[in-house]
């Protein structure tokens, strides 16, 4: 058996920053820290922090007054900031800068009198946060079919934004339908879909023809990981989205000579290595690392954390 190990795979710069942020906060203040929603959508990562004593909450009201609350990589709405302020919480914002970019675009378009069509998945943390920036000015759509039902006229001021973790192809179909109906629709100068999402999708698309089966490391609630599996399935390859080696089933590999292994942007490298170890031990697999694109992006830790560090050091 041969393993094609896709590169790039796994953690993106935003996930790296959010996890480093929480690690730093624990080192500075101990594990009595609260996080609004999952820090990133990955079971392994969330369990690692839970074991250390970090508490993940879905309501700001669950955080004791005066505590430290860290906002996850997916971003939050202004309402959550206000609730945190009202409870006198020390907040650290670990929102991915690429998500913040979409929030700022939503605010800018809404202030300029545009109605925004947000392409994304209902209920996703990122979408909830973005819509919260200008709820009266944003309509969410998921599919090209939904465009026909929109009631905007030919002269309405319209703009579109996208969730950062969508499939490039999926978003492209919706954008095509929007442009077909409203050729004048505006969009940001630089697209919203994250570089890491695009690069991981590109790697699967390029390498899938060489593979008999595709393994995607990532959690079921991870939007970008799910897209990688869907790309594999769309190319008629058996594709599985798994959290780790414990979910592998030997019969999947019956007759498979080449296995493509990749990981979503929130999946840690340790779970990838566990799967490779399983395939090496079970099937005497050899590994070929295939790099389709280089990545050199990194984001600094949020300023609140740097400031808290300085305050702590001076005490």
Image: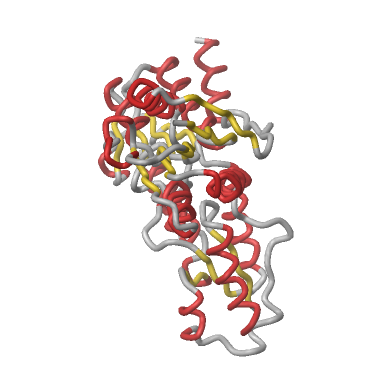
Residue 197 percent coordinates (x, y): 56, 47
Left or right of residue 189: residue 309: left
Q: Between residue 243 and residue 35, name the one nearer to us.
A: 243
Visible residue check, residue 37: no
Left or right of residue 12: residue 79: left
Residue 297 percent coordinates (x, y): 66, 34
301 lies above or below 95: above
Q: Which color mode does the image show?
A: secondary structure
Which residue is located at x 55 percent, y 41 percent? 96
Residue 49 percent coordinates (x, y): 34, 26
Q: Residue furthest front?
A: 255
Residue 310 percent coordinates (x, y): 57, 17
220 lies above or below 306: below
Determine the image quadrant of residue 185.
bottom right
Visible residue check, residue 211: yes
Which residue is located at x 33 percent, y 24 percent? 282
Which residue is located at x 46 percent, y 27 percent? 269
Determine the image quadrant of residue 124.
bottom left
Q: How many marks?
A: 0
Which residue is located at x 49 percent, y 57 percent? 235
Q: Between residue 149 and residue 4, name the one nearer to us.
A: 4
Left or right of residue 95: residue 34: left
87 lies above or below 314: below
Location of the N terminus (image quadrant): top left
Left or right of residue 179: residue 90: left
Determine the image quadrant of residue 86.
top left
């Amino acid at each position: 058996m041969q393993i094609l190990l896709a590169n790039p795979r796994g953690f993106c710069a935003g996930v790296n920053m959010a996890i480093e942020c929480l690690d730093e906060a624990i080192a500075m203040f101990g594990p009595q820290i609260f996080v609004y929603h999952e820090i990133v959508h990955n079971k392994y990562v969330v369990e690692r922090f839970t074991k250390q004593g970090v508490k993940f909450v879905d309501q700001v009201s669950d955080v004791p007054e005066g505590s430290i609350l860290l906002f996850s990589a997916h971003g939050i709405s202004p309402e959550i900031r206000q609730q945190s302020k009202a409870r006198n919480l020390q907040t650290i914002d670990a929102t991915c800068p690429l998500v913040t970019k979409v929030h700022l675009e939503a605010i800018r378009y809404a202030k300029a009198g545009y109605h925004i069509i947000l392409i994304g998945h209902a209920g996703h943390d990122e979408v909830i946060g973005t819509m919260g920036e200008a709820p009266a000015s944003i309509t969410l759509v998921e599919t090209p079919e939904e465009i026909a039902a929109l009631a905007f006229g030919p002269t309405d001021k319209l703009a579109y934004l996208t969730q950062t973790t969508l499939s490039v192809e999926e978003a492209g179909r919706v954008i095509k339908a929007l442009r077909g109906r409203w050729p004048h629709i505006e969009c940001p100068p630089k697209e919203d879909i994250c570089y890491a999402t695009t690069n991981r999708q590109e790697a699967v698309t390029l390498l899938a023809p060489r593979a008999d089966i595709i393994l995607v490391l990532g959690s079921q609630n991870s939007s970008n990981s799910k897209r990688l599996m869907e790309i594999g399935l769309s190319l008629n390859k058996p594709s599985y989205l798994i959290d780790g080696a414990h979910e592998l089933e030997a019969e999947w590999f019956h007759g498979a000579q080449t296995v493509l292994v990749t990981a979503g942007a929130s999946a840690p490298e340790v779970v990838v290595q566990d799967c490779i170890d399983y395939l090496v031990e079970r099937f005497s697999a050899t590994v070929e690392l295939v790099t389709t694109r280089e990545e050199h992006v990194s984001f600094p830790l949020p300023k609140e954390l740097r400031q808290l560090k300085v305050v702590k050091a001076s005490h």
